[in-house]
Amino acid sequence: MANITKKVSWSSRADESAAAGEATPLLNGSEQPQHSRQLSGGGSIFQIGRLSTVDLEEEITSEEDSLRGRPKEIPHNEKLLSLKYESLDYDNIENQLFLEEERRMSYMGFRCLEISRWVVCGLIGFLTGLIACFIDIVVEQLAGIKYQVVKENIEKFTEAGGLSISLILWAVLNFTFVMVGAIIVAFFEPIAAGSGIPQIKCYLNGVKIPRVVRLKTLVIKVCGVICSVVGGLAVGKEGPMIHSGAVVAAGVSQGRSTSLKRDFKIFEYFRRDTEKRDFVSAGAAAGVSAAFGAPVGGVLFSLEEGASFWNQMLTWRIFFASMISTFTLNFFLSIYHANPGDLSNPGLINFGRFEGDSVTYNLYEIPLFIAMGAIGGLLGALFNVLNYWLTIFRIRYVHRPCLQVMEAMLVAAVTATVSFTMIYFSNDCQPLGPESTEEYPLQLFCADGEYNSMATAFFNTPERSVRSLFHNQPGTYNPLTLGLFTLTYFFLACWTYGLAVSAGVFIPSLLIGAAWGRLCGILLASITSTSSVGAQHSSTIWADPGKYALIGAAAQLGGIVRMTLSLTVIMVEATGNVTYGLPIMLVLMTAKIVGDYFEEGLYDIHIKLQSVPFLHWEAPATSHWLTAREVMSSPVTCLNRIEKVGTIVDILSNTSTNHNGFPVVVQVPGSDEPAKLCGLILRSQLIVLLKHKVFVELARSRLTRRKLQLKDFRDAYPRFPPIQSIHVSQDERECMMDLTEFMNPTPYTVPQETSLPRVFKLFRALGLRHLVVVDDENRVVGLVTRKDLARYHLGKHGLEELQLAQT
Amino acid sequence: MANITKKVSWSSRADESAAAGEATPLLNGSEQPQHSRQLSGGGSIFQIGRLSTVDLEEEITSEEDSLRGRPKEIPHNEKLLSLKYESLDYDNIENQLFLEEERRMSYMGFRCLEISRWVVCGLIGFLTGLIACFIDIVVEQLAGIKYQVVKENIEKFTEAGGLSISLILWAVLNFTFVMVGAIIVAFFEPIAAGSGIPQIKCYLNGVKIPRVVRLKTLVIKVCGVICSVVGGLAVGKEGPMIHSGAVVAAGVSQGRSTSLKRDFKIFEYFRRDTEKRDFVSAGAAAGVSAAFGAPVGGVLFSLEEGASFWNQMLTWRIFFASMISTFTLNFFLSIYHANPGDLSNPGLINFGRFEGDSVTYNLYEIPLFIAMGAIGGLLGALFNVLNYWLTIFRIRYVHRPCLQVMEAMLVAAVTATVSFTMIYFSNDCQPLGPESTEEYPLQLFCADGEYNSMATAFFNTPERSVRSLFHNQPGTYNPLTLGLFTLTYFFLACWTYGLAVSAGVFIPSLLIGAAWGRLCGILLASITSTSSVGAQHSSTIWADPGKYALIGAAAQLGGIVRMTLSLTVIMVEATGNVTYGLPIMLVLMTAKIVGDYFEEGLYDIHIKLQSVPFLHWEAPATSHWLTAREVMSSPVTCLNRIEKVGTIVDILSNTSTNHNGFPVVVQVPGSDEPAKLCGLILRSQLIVLLKHKVFVELARSRLTRRKLQLKDFRDAYPRFPPIQSIHVSQDERECMMDLTEFMNPTPYTVPQETSLPRVFKLFRALGLRHLVVVDDENRVVGLVTRKDLARYHLGKHGLEELQLAQT
């Protein structure tokens, strides 16, 4: 595949396109600039995980296997934007059909729609909660079995001295689970790898990631996450919940499953990008809510990542879905724990209650917290840099599914070995008191009534380890143990993220942070207790290392993912204590500032490495000197309002340019004046029109076909057939097609002088896919798409421009 | 003043304006439609509170007293929209000056700006917290003094039998406080009346309410709220905090005080509507945060009410301001309570901690909660209807300041009398245990070691009463006492809201709700305990009436104010317990649905009665059949790019039409083609241009004046002088003015066929003030302003159209 790059030369390009705009009134070119761009020599085809196996070609050739011979090393250049990602359209296509339907609808009709939106959100919340519940219970059962088996084995061999057999048993168990998890992900649905948060971020941002919200993805994701958590990898099951929620939402809201070939004939009104995306926001929020017991955090996550336009009712519905989700999880878990009605487990993880005197902090602790935030930012940046290199390595060398499975198994084996070694050599024995919260204590070489705390840390689910680090009595952990644990887990977690397994990075981050945070707390306590000044007073303040564990966890997580408001709220909700709001916020802020100095957030790195045209909240600060004229793609392929079928088919079939939106122009009959813009039509609409053969014969007598309805477009949504699958005979090619009824007659337009930030704001606030640039005679001179805007970003040396690549 | 109404006739108007658009290329009309509208006979001049004394005339004649003779009865028609409210412009005026400045600015410059935004937000939070702290402490001190005085007096007369003297003493004390509070509000700053939430809602919505964010308003508001709370009225001090925060924000962010005539020469970049409104959002959030200890709730409040466009960094800053605000309040209160470092008082009110077993609820309680929500909705609607009638009455008859003061004093007297009577006749004695939380117990006729609970309810600050209702042991309250208290307080609170005193309605609502909620709890407990089936089990569940008090409080408050997401989060944060999230949400939802069936929310009623052109989130559902052509005002007053000064002065001086935005058109020289749109200029900009005499002499030689800079516009912001104050000589009238540099060259435009929802979305998402409607030749055919959109609303009989009124 050839690779298109764009030569930058502001003044000349501006002149060119201005000239083009004046000289060629009816433009016939491409949405993505071609003529004014140079073809560069190959090389920049790249591949991430196996996400990019799902590209345009596959869309076209449908189910064809794309795993044929690839180069062994895939060179990668991150200064590229991929053209293969299409945008979602958050702007309603207000064509005549749509307006007619809306006008026909009564007020009661709108009320019913509103009610069904609420029902859908309730369902989304309920199903997401159920899935979370299912994952939790299965993981707990399997982990319990694994623990029993290994424990019995270890107890058998501790005295006899054959502990290496236990190691092998443990490793084999982990191995098997991870292998299953990696195989289903790598071979059946590569998009289910990782936490899914970057993908959902992209989706909510308005980028269509192929196959991301399919039922198959959900099934693989759920099984995959169970396998990888039980397999003892340094992963969490929380991130995948967000993806799961989104898939549930996309499925439920459409009232049908394309995978299962079932159409329930309900919610047909919701079969368009605008509505679907709203529901996916709700699903993502429900996922966060189920994962962390943080309904408000979920709402804020969705808004932070997605909402083009904040709408009160929508937010309220999203909140409803979140609430139902956390409530469902809570309720079913309470039944599972044989304590129905006890609604104290609102999420997959909760940090336990921070109550009483131990939680107060003082003003002079705040600088300490900020310092910890800085450490978190540094460690987070280190994590991200390492993971970035690793990802580049993976893109280049580990792109075959079998290699990916092997890597996952290697990581599983290494994790098991390292853990075992550390347990073996640690002699940190802790008394097994009656108030001990450990569910999987391992005695090992400890005296009776004691347990090995390192073993516990590794055997516990990471969630429980986090809680122990937050709440265990001072003195439970040996500083050396904590230090070693932090170090090991840091590298393991870093290696693990990006493997072809479904798993999240939240919990490992929290765990690393909690470990070094607690370490800080212990060190502070020992420093202050040895100093003689005011020892009695200060020791009570510093006495609780759990507080520092919490701050450390926040700092580390913030340093890695760089989320802001939503993460603060999630942390506050998970601790159930508003008092910690300010310190957590300060810590997250510091971590973000420090971390951003070195490297972007983990999710942003992965989005960037996948060359997704992601739009941030605002245009780059120093981009006021760019105008629509420089940004837009031109010339533009325009269609006439009444266009020849053959022309349309040819334009759509042109695989070198993958255009999705076409301005429709009208020529004043009998005049040689240039054509004016009169509408905008999408590829998907044209395809449906061609499929239903809505042609006007040359003699202008309409064929006796039934009138095309919105339903036809909705039925085809979202998997519109490729143009190649539509057969148009030679006779039909000579027919005409009247686009008047189907085009959007009032597309948003801007003049050529509009500054980039202004274009950007319009684009972002309205969730546009295409923005037509017109001259002062209302003639089309260019088209701005998501990729044209995403190409500009602030680099180290000021404004940089990314290149566009076909893959 | 004449009153303009609009005759509706869709088809004919559409034809008219379409014809006008084609026939008169260079339009010379008005922003508000005139020609096509009929003048109706007077009558609809109206007056709310004294808010509307600040109208255009006063802006023009500056400090002239507007208290001259008014008709005694002011007829009122709520189906009007006032033309006197101007809009804020959330859309940056990207003229050449602005773009030049932005282009000159380096990346570091933008970073510094960003940092100063954070500093400003920190300051806003800090000062808002301080103000909250000040109000709290002063109220507590004054209330303490009042309590001491009255208590001693009562104790003196309880035995002797002259309790009427105590009543008089009490009444006189309350009287005095309320009188002071009412006088300063009614005579000095009427805008400071009430909670200020409707005004801030309007401001955040984009309507400029005159004088709402001035320093004087803040001072009067703070003093007023202290007086009315200490005066024993059924009011809270929480609502006014939101207004106070907003004023602080508007002041701090501008780096100067126009009232104090001090300009600190800082933050000059922020002197425009866009930036100011962002900061006011932060201020309002900080206010909510300080009032309820709910930083997240504050952010959501701001977003729910204001955010045109959700921006991640902005939200994060708003959250920062909220956090700082609650932290400041907490910190200073902890010092005041001689317990520094105890950060457990995050807000002016907190509901106390709901912890332990008493807080669990069960699935079968949820229908009960929903029923309570319905009751809350009904009672709230009743409250709103009563208050609506009362407000109409006040508008008609109680519009003089002296009458307003007298009404306030009457209410104070009645409140005192009713309270005293109820205390006198109540014999609900409760033991004064060691764990009793009452700070002001009154023994009255009770035995030693007991206190009169009715007296306590009336003597306590409402905040403390709410907390007692939530947390006191079962059996603390007599059902009869609660019932009587609910009834009395309901009517008192209803009468009080809308008085010319600064006070909020949150706390009274919570108190009413908590009272009847607790009553429900007590009744449920007595029903279930007398029934024999499973008595032991159910009694423990039903035993805690505090839970029902909380639900009742939420229901009542939700029924009155109808806030959704933000109120849920505020309640959850104030209880400090996420577990109650779902029930509170369900209750608020039910209350809103039931309440909306009868009457709008209290704030919306007051906004409507003030005829504010308020834009809701979405266009009315059934408005798809309206297009920009029908909605827009036309013909439009356009200016030429190089326009004669005299023409401009004449257009601006035309008081019958108060236009604020003028499309700028350009005629192709030497051609008779119609003029094309080339920009948009605001009245305020023209005024600054005239003031600085930026004229081009007829000979086209530029006057030797310094070049006008953005600074000149910023210095004049936001109180631009009226056109009358600018002297333009006859010679100067003949000069020309070149608008090219100052106009916004890329105003947003829509074609005439654009549907209303689409126009609405564009308007709302971008926070526009003017939207130019063009034909397909890019000629101006109309202008859509906020009032044109706000005129359409969904009434009982489908889509209704409001009339426009000059006052």
Image (spheres, coloured by chain):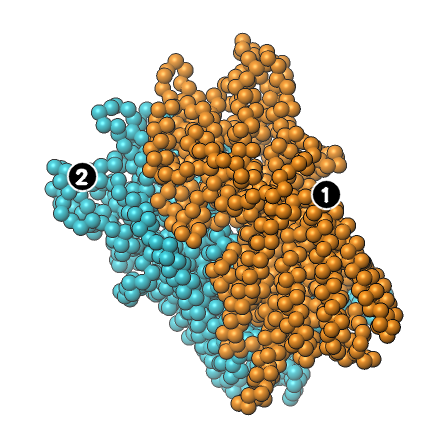
Chain colours: A orange, B cyan
Decide if residue A76 is on the left or right side of residue B669: right
Amino acid type at mark 2: Met
Give the distance between the C-alpha atoms of the residues marked 2 and 1, in whole angstroms.
74 Å
Decide if residue B280 is on the left or right side of residue A542: left
Q: What element carries label 2?
A: strand
For mark 1, what is the residue?
A187
Check the picture and name the quadrant holding the N terminus of chain A.
top right
Can you say whether B315 is above or below B693 in the image? below
Q: Is mark 1 on a helix, strand or loop?
A: helix
Amino acid type at mark 1: Phe
For mark 2, what is the residue?
B736
> Residue at (43%, 66%) from the top-left corner?
B122
Q: Position of residue A736 (x, y in %)?
A: 54, 16
Check the picture and name the quadrant holding the C terminus of chain A.
top right
| Chain ID, mark 1 | A
Question: In this view of the protein, which residue sits in the foreground, B716 or A357?
Answer: A357
The picture quadrant where one finds residue B29 is top left
